Image (cartoon, coloured by chain):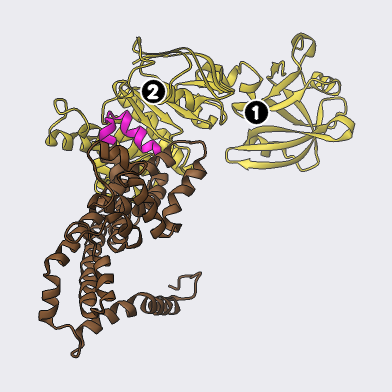
Amino acid sequence: MNKTNILPGFKPALGFTLLYLGLVVLIPLSTLLFKTLQPDSLLTWQGYIDIISNERVLAAFRVSFLAALLAAAIALVLGFVIAWTLVRYSLPAKRFFDAIIDLPFALPTAVAGIVLASLYAPNGLIGQPLTGLGFKVAFTPAGIVVALIFIGLPFVVRTIEPVLQEIDASMEEAALLMGASRWQIFQRIIFPNVFPAALTGFAMAFARGVGEYGSVIFIAGNLPYISEIVPLLIITKLEQYDYAGATALALTMLLVSFFLLLTINLVQMLLRRRAEIPETLVPVVAV
Amino acid sequence: MSIILNNISKHFGNFSALKDINLEIPEGELVALLGPSGCGKTTLLRIIAGLERPDTGQVLLKGEDKTYQDIRERGVGFVFQHYALFRHMSVFENIAFGLRVKPRNKRPSEAEIQKKVHALLELVQLDWLQNRYPDQLSGGQRQRIALARALAVEPEVLLLDEPFGALDASVRKDLRQWLRHLHENLNVTSIFVTHDQEEAMEVASRVVVFNHGVIEQQGSPSEIYDNPANEFVSRFIGDTNIIPLEHHNADWLALSGLSIATNANTANEVHVRPHDLEITKSNNDNAATATLKDWQHLGALIRIELAKKGVNGTPDIIYAEMPNEQFKRLQLGKGDKVELRIRHAHWFDAA
């Protein structure tokens, strides 16, 4: 049977998709891979291992991925609460709050970095009281996490918000009437419905955080072994004309990020399959 | 469990949804709250369930004041218009939900849950659907699952909010019958909200008619149909011809057999059910006459469209109904003159 399509048929659509994915994503990324693997490449296998197993490099990887994971996790919790507030309560100036959430998307990240650094600096508006309490945020790994939360938050809010909007509030009322406690309602009704979207938001915030450069370098302090991130190390190597070293780091980063995102996508696929309609079942017509 | 509502009022901003409602529902009844949309019937149902708090008044269940009691401890089962099934759970898990969320010391064992859910699935005749998800069910099936889910926690009161409102006509008809039989078997006090007067009359043992936040009338379906308390109830329940008592109608009514002098003290409107109009073929110009315009088959009945002389010569349309056979015997055609007799009428003082 011929299905009616609104956009031009399957072939041109697929061709278009592949062409642009290729031009924009695949070719630049695979160039990185091919450059590294060329026989006349400056980078030998042993050289690669040496660069990657360098203490300072390993520390940078740890800082980059742990900070991104932690920030994405915190952004997930904060983002859920914000999305919940925006969806479930009628606030004055809701539109205004809504616009503010997207601001990190639009702001040059370097500006965000400078502002955050001056706020959280030991003599800054927020940094000063924190220092009094014994916390040091700016120029430590904690500063990196703060910057990455700032960058990642809108991803979480924007992915969770539409799903929360769609949840039928009468499901919660039904659960309440059947005797469920508030926690049980969250755990058994709201959470399973929001989880796939939350995972997407988390993955996006994480992916963005791993690659973030502009906002982090201003607040991180960039101390080797402590608060130095991989993107900064790549830039440093490039500035020293160490192209092989930069490529090795970039390639590793690409692979690790890709596998993490792939894992998250697989989890989501499994979740979706569990809730999906088995195709063998015929639609039910009878009453 | 009996339900008593004392002086319930509820406002939403400036809008007064319920005004001083007093209602008593004896144990085991199946009651319909009937009214046009926006009349406050759903709000009242939600107040009984505890999903809304009344501004004033009390809700007594089994004689106990439960107005401010926690929803979870009311023993109320609720069925929503749009089912509100948990879409991420199978049919089985939907029904088991109320049992699984019980506190640990009251929670039945897995074997008991299995047994109970299967018993409920059999009650709603959908045992074969236990592994499906709500998205895979038809509307009628979803509503029956929603009902089974509400019954799982053994409620003492069952509340249904427009339970058949989102279903198509033939399914609705089947489910009405089914609900009445179910109620006969379970005998749990049940209240359902509807805007469909036919549904209320067919299912309920007792009908409460609402309008603008007040109770207009309550009683058995036949009481309400035969003796509407006021003009609104008469209009809302069943079909009726509304004839204003103006001068040109007065004579006409007198000729059709209604004595205005004895009835029209304060009334200014006469309501005549279509089946209370008797028609005979006529050549007599003096009798209350009308012209037959058209007719429609309603199955066993024929609805006859009649034009009678109105103000300034424009015709007023009135409807009569009679059995098919009787209409055939009269051998009437379009444009024929007919004589009318009104067997029975209701007189109202309409505002």
Lower sequence index among marks 2 and 1: 2
Q: Is A258 or B100 nearer to us in this picture?
A: A258
**Residue at the (50%, 21%) spot, across then down:** B207
**Residue at the (67%, 29%) spot, across then down:** B274
**Residue at the (46%, 33%) spot, across then down:** B162
Q: Which residue, given by chain and number where applicable, does mark 1 sit on?
A: B275
Where is residue B212 drawn, in percent x and y?
59, 23
Q: Is B241 or A40 nearer to us in this picture?
A: A40
Amino acid type assigned to the residue bearing label 2 in the image = Gly
Which chain does the residue under circle 2 lie in? Answer: B
Amino acid type assigned to the residue bearing label 1 in the image = His
Q: Report helix, strand or loop for mark 1.
A: helix
Residue A38 picture quarter? bottom left
Q: Is residue B303 left or right of residue B306?
A: left
Q: In the rendered view, would you say B263 is above or below B38?
A: above
Where is residue A33 drawn, in percent x and y?
24, 80
Q: Residue furthest bottom?
A: A40
Q: Is B130 or B181 nearer to us in this picture?
A: B130
Q: Residues within 10 Å of mark 1 (few under 14, many from 20)?
A: some
Which chain does the residue under circle 1 lie in? Answer: B
Q: Main secondary structure of the magenta part?
A: helix
Q: In the rendered view, would you say A238 is above or below A112?
A: below
**Residue at the (70%, 37%) spot, across then down:** B304
Q: Residues within 10 Å of mark 2 (few under 14, many from 20)?
A: many
Which chain is tinted brown?
Answer: A
Q: Quadrant of the N terminus of chain A?
A: bottom left
| Magenta range | A169-185
- The label shown at residue B248 is none
Q: Which residue, given by chain and number where applicable, does mark 2 sit on?
A: B50
